[in-house]
Amino acid sequence: MRLIFFGPPGAGKGTQAVRLEATKGIKQLSTGDMLRAQIAAGSEIGLKAKSYMDAGNLVPDEVLIDMIESRISQDDCAAGFILDGFPRTLPQAEALDVMLEKRGTPLDAVLVFEVDEGELFERVRRRAAESLAATGQVRSDDNEDVLRNRLSVYRNQTAPLLPYYTEKGLIKAVNGMNPVEQVALDVDAALTK
Ligand code: AMP
């Protein structure tokens, strides 16, 4: 199964993608995690990406497109994958279509996690506090000012993908405001319909 998990930052895409990878063996590909790994490794891509990420802006399309193209070609993606955080712009979505068409492996669904903005601020506050307690560190983009910018980037650059995928008949929506266990049931139900 090839899926896109779509929604604003903090909507719960990562939590559900990690769960589906564990239960169904579909590889979770988080572009945010990949970029953070590049930063940790001190690579050229990481150096380039860091300032965009810290400000809550998007890293240039060509970096992401190359990264996803080489990642989905690997053996562990042969049975399928969940794209978590990609695509985030129209050029990324169009490049993904070209890649998948070339392989003859179309998308099965785009699962949209719907969450109110007020709840997203609450979640970022909670996530930062939990991370600080557990590791003594907070993701450099986990604060309210950066979230405000990330939401405006989402509204302006990413949300316009919804009509793109609606036209292709791929959209399935889940209510991301529900408790995580209920969202899990709704995700499973949406994917078996
Ligand atoms: P995430 O962990 O998905 O919230 O992503 C963290 C940050 O990584 C984003 O705010 C962007 O700066 C960058 N990023 C992740 N995925 C993409 C993407 N598909 N296109 C551009 N930038 C991205």
Image (cartoon, rainbow, N blue to C red):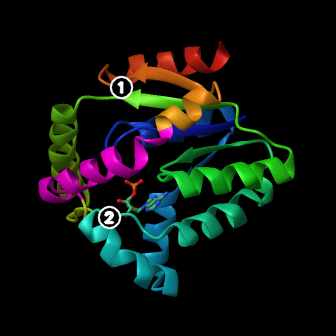
Left or right placement of residue 168 versus residue 177 in this view = right
Q: CA distance from mark 1 to mark 2?
A: 23 Å
Q: Height in image: 33 above or below 158?
A: below
- Give the mark nearest the N terminus, 1 or 2: 2
Disc 2 Cβ-to-ligand 1 distance below 8 Å: yes
Q: Height in image: 29 above or below 19?
A: below
Q: Height in image: 120 above or below 92?
A: above
Q: Height in image: 5 above or below 116?
A: below
**x, y percentage for residue 174?**
44, 21
Identity of the amino acid at label 1? Gly
Residue extent of the magenta highlight: 142-161
Identity of the amino acid at label 2? Asn
What number is the disc on residue 176?
1
Front residue of 158/123: it is 158
Badge nearest the viewer, 1 or 2? 2
Q: Quadrant of the N terminus?
A: top right
Question: Mark 2 highlights which residue?
Answer: 57
